[in-house]
Image: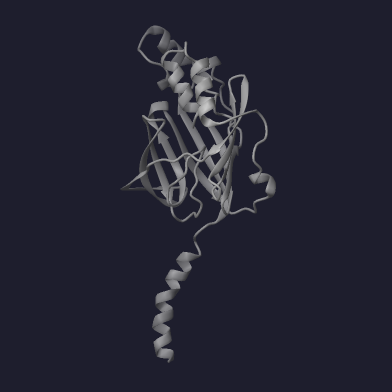
Amino acid sequence: MKKILIPILSFLLPILTEAQTFIAKGKIEFERKINVHKQFEGEGEWVQEMKSQIPQFKITYFDYFFDGDQSCYKPGREVADAKSPGFFEVGVAQDNIVYTNFASQQFTSQKQVFEKQFLIQDSVRKINWKLTDDTRKIAGFNCRKATGIIMDSVFVFAFYTDEILITGGPEGFSGLPGMILGIAIPRINTTWFATKLELVPIAPKDLAPPTKGKKTNVPDLQKSLLSSLKDWGKYAERNVWQVML
C-alpha cells in the first residue's frame, strides 16, 4: 500500500501547492501614466514651446483593495513632480474612487469632473473581451492579453492573471477570468499597470463605497458631459472618454 501511496502523493503535491497560490484578498498598487505631450497636436512653435515647459508624463498612483466579491479603487501615494499648467494637467480622473460589488454586478463611483463632483451608481460595464495568446509578466504575475472596445469606438488592451481570483481591474474595468493588472488605451495616451501586490488584512473602511457628490448614473452623466463640452471641439470627446472610464 505504501508503494502505491507514494507515487500518488508525489503527483498530487505540486497540484496542491499550486492551488495555494490563488489569491482572494489583498491590496494592489497601480501606476497610471499619461503621455501629456501626445495631448498636443501639430508641430507649430506654440506646441513645441508648451511641450518644453511640461513633463512628458503625468504619473499618479492608485490602490485597489479587494476581498471576496468586493473591491475599491482609490487614490494612493502622492508623487512629488512638477505641476503641469491648467487644462493640460489632465486632472479629470485623478481622484476617482470606484467601489464594485461583483455579486450584485453594481458599482458606485465618485468622480471629480472639473469643478463638480458626481456620485455614479449603475451596473458594471459589460465588455466583449477577446482573449489572445500574447503574455507578459506584471508585478510578478504571468498575465494574458485581451482586447476590447468601450464607448463604441475606444480600443482597450488588458492583461489579466488567473492567479488572483477577483475578476476586477483598475477604474471600472472587469469581466476577464481573473484580475486585470494592466490596461492601455492608446486613444487617451494612458496606461495603468500594477506595481506590486500586498497580502495585507482588509479593513471595512478599505472597501467602503464613496458617498460624496451629485447622484447620477452612466447615461445621464455622459449626456451632461456632452452638453457641457459641446464647444470644446475635438477635446470634448477625449475628456468624455477620460471621465467615463
Q: Looking at the picture, does residue 55 appear above or below residue 211? A: above
Residue 61: x %, y % from top left: 55, 36
Residue found 52% across the figure and 31% down from its top: 218
Residue 18: x %, y % from top left: 45, 65
Q: Looking at the picture, does residue 90 appear above or below residue 165? A: above
Residue found 47% across the figure and 65% down from its top: 19
Residue found 39% across the figure and 76% down from its top: 11
Q: Residue furthest bottom?
A: 1
Residue 149: x %, y % from top left: 37, 35
Looking at the picture, tell me which residue is in the foreground, 3 or 24.
24
| Left or right for 150, reference 107 | left
| Left or right for 39, reference 78 | left
Looking at the picture, tell me which residue is in the foreground, 24 or 84.
24
Residue 194: x %, y % from top left: 49, 43
Residue found 41% across the figure and 40% down from its top: 127
Quarter-of-image position of residue 51: top left
Total numbered circles = 0
Q: Looking at the picture, does residue 196 appear above or below residue 84? A: below
Q: Looking at the picture, does residue 146 appear above or below residue 228? A: below
Q: Residue furthest left?
A: 133
Quick one: quadrant of the N terminus? Answer: bottom left
How is the structure coloured here?
one colour
